[in-house]
Image (cartoon, grey):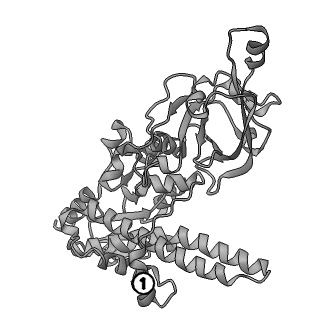
């Protein structure tokens, strides 16, 4: 096990696409996978029936929360008894599971993942076919394609591809693996500065940037933006872990409503903070690069695009050439919410959307292009996309150059 790599969380992983027969098996009363010889590489040679506690998840782009159910998987060789008693020279490995909500959602073409955790439990994930989350899981585990019908297996998860960084951390959490990245050397300074409470997102973003004194936006917008985001994420998780631990230590004295309310506040803060932090850092970057903008300025029908360039006044000036206007929506993750951007800023025909979503599906990016929406991602995220997609993507440096050129016309 190597800290900071996938091997910290998985002993091995196996992926395959479900055939129509297998999808029917999963939903039926048989509940067994045949032809799973490849799983021996991570589950070993079974001696009798080996039962693993398992967490099942069904993932799709359409729902913010996965379907999750606890259960078990049983690994065994159906021919072991015949070999021992009658000398039959055959092996027939099977993986058994009970009916659950996840198995009933499975369909042909869905991605199936069986991953072994260091605590000897299994993670069983079914991701809907042709979705972004399925693409992300494949990228996370280092698979570009699954070319044969059986399981594709990886045991060693310590290559550079397996290093856990910003994109992989968010994908891991989407499949129920909590990645705690903290830097305790900053904790005392943050507690003193913020008085033991969470500051506003804007104040926290400013503080995070102040800890990276040698970072200059003009040195490279893509790298700088991600340096700021990485640092804020680490500092936030450090402060959050301490403050949550402190609150839990005080207890809730049996007050279930207070506990649920506290839990929801933690989840909501995590969801909203990343997007706001991204906007905060972009705002300073644009200013440092000499780019004029308005943030959250109202356009038509009370819509408020995240950024309008060169600004609100120009947008509402009917005499201003719309070809010199630019709008940028900002969403840390897209899912199906990218379509919201299409209804903002009617004067601007071609919209731009900046996201930190890795490996968006080809179906989604094709639709974005058809809707005249240009996707913008930090340069490091481009490698998670196909070669065809990369030819169309715009990086942050390219976007700032575009806006500056229009501003200078």
In the shown orientation, is residue 120 left or right of residue 3?
Answer: right
Number of labelled discs?
A: 1
Percent coordinates x, y for residue 6 in the rendering? 47, 48
Res 346 seen here? no
In the shown orientation, is residue 313 left or right of residue 118?
Answer: left
> What residue would you read off at disc 1?
188
In the shown orientation, is residue 138 left or right of residue 309?
Answer: right
Observer-nearest of 119 and 141: 119
Give the residue drawn at x 62%, y 49%.
Answer: 119
Percent coordinates x, y for residue 295 in the rendering? 38, 75
Percent coordinates x, y for residue 66 in the rendering? 65, 52
Give the residue drawn at x 53%, y 42%.
Answer: 11
Observer-nearest of 403 and 383: 383
Dividing the image into 4 quarters, which one contains the C terminus?
Answer: bottom left
Figure quadrant of residue 4: bottom left
Observer-nearest of 90 and 286: 90
Give the residue drawn at x 27%, y 65%.
Answer: 224
Q: Secondary structure at mark 1?
A: helix
For the view shown, which residue lies furthest in the left direction? 408
Percent coordinates x, y for residue 292 in the rendering? 26, 74
Figure quadrant of residue 209: bottom left
For the view shown, which residue lies furthest in the right direction? 29
Give the residue drawn at x 51%, y 74%.
Answer: 302
Res 188 seen here? yes
Q: Residues within 10 Å of mark 1 (few under 14, many from 20)?
A: few
Above or below, comparing residue 32 to residue 185 in the picture: above
């Amino acid at each position: 096990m190597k800290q900071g790599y996938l091997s910290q969380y998985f002993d091995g992983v196996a992926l395959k696409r479900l055939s129509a027969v297998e999808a029917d098996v999963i939903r039926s009363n048989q509940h067994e996978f045949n032809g799973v010889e490849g799983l021996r590489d991570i589950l070993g040679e079974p001696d009798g029936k080996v039962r693993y506690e398992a967490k099942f998840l069904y993932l799709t782009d359409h729902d913010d929360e996965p379907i999750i159910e606890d259960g078990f998987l049983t690994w065994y060789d159906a021919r072991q008894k015949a070999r021992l008693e009658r000398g039959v020279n055959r092996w027939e490995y099977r993986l058994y599971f009970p009916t659950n909500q996840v198995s009933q959602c499975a369909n042909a073409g869905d991605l199936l993942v069986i991953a072994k955790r260091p605590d000897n439990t299994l993670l069983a994930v079914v991701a809907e076919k042709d979705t972004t989350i399925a693409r992300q899981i494949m990228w996370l585990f280092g698979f570009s394609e699954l070319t044969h019908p059986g399981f594709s297996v990886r045991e060693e998860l310590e290559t550079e591809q397996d290093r856990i960084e910003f994109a992989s951390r968010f994908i891991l959490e989407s499949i129920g693996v909590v990645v705690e990245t903290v830097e305790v050397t900053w904790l005392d300074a943050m507690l003193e500065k913020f008085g033991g409470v969470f500051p506003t997102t804007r104040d926290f973003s400013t503080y995070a940037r102040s800890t990276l004194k040698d970072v200059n936006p003009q040195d490279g917008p893509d790298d700088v933006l991600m340096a700021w985001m990485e640092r804020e994420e680490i500092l936030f998780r450090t402060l959050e872990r301490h403050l949550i631990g402190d609150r839990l230590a005080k207890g809730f004295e049996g007050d279930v409503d207070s506990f649920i309310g506290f839990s929801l506040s933690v989840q909501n803060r995590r969801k909203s903070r990343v997007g706001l932090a991204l906007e905060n850092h972009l705002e300073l970057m644009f200013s440092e690069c000499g780019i004029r903008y308005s943030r959250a300025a109202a356009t038509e029908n009370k819509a408020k695009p995240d950024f309008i360039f060169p600004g609100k006044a120009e947008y509402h000036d009917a005499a201003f050439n719309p070809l010199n206007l630019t709008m940028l929506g900002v969403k840390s993750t897209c899912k199906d919410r990218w379509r919201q951007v299409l209804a903002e800023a009617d004067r601007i025909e071609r919209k731009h959307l900046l996201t930190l979503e890795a490996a968006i599906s080809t179906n989604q990016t094709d639709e974005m292009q058809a809707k005249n929406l240009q996707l913008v991602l930090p340069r490091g995220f481009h490698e998670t996309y196909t070669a065809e997609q990369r030819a169309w993507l715009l990086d942050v440096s390219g976007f700032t150059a575009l806006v500056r050129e229009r501003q200078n016309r």
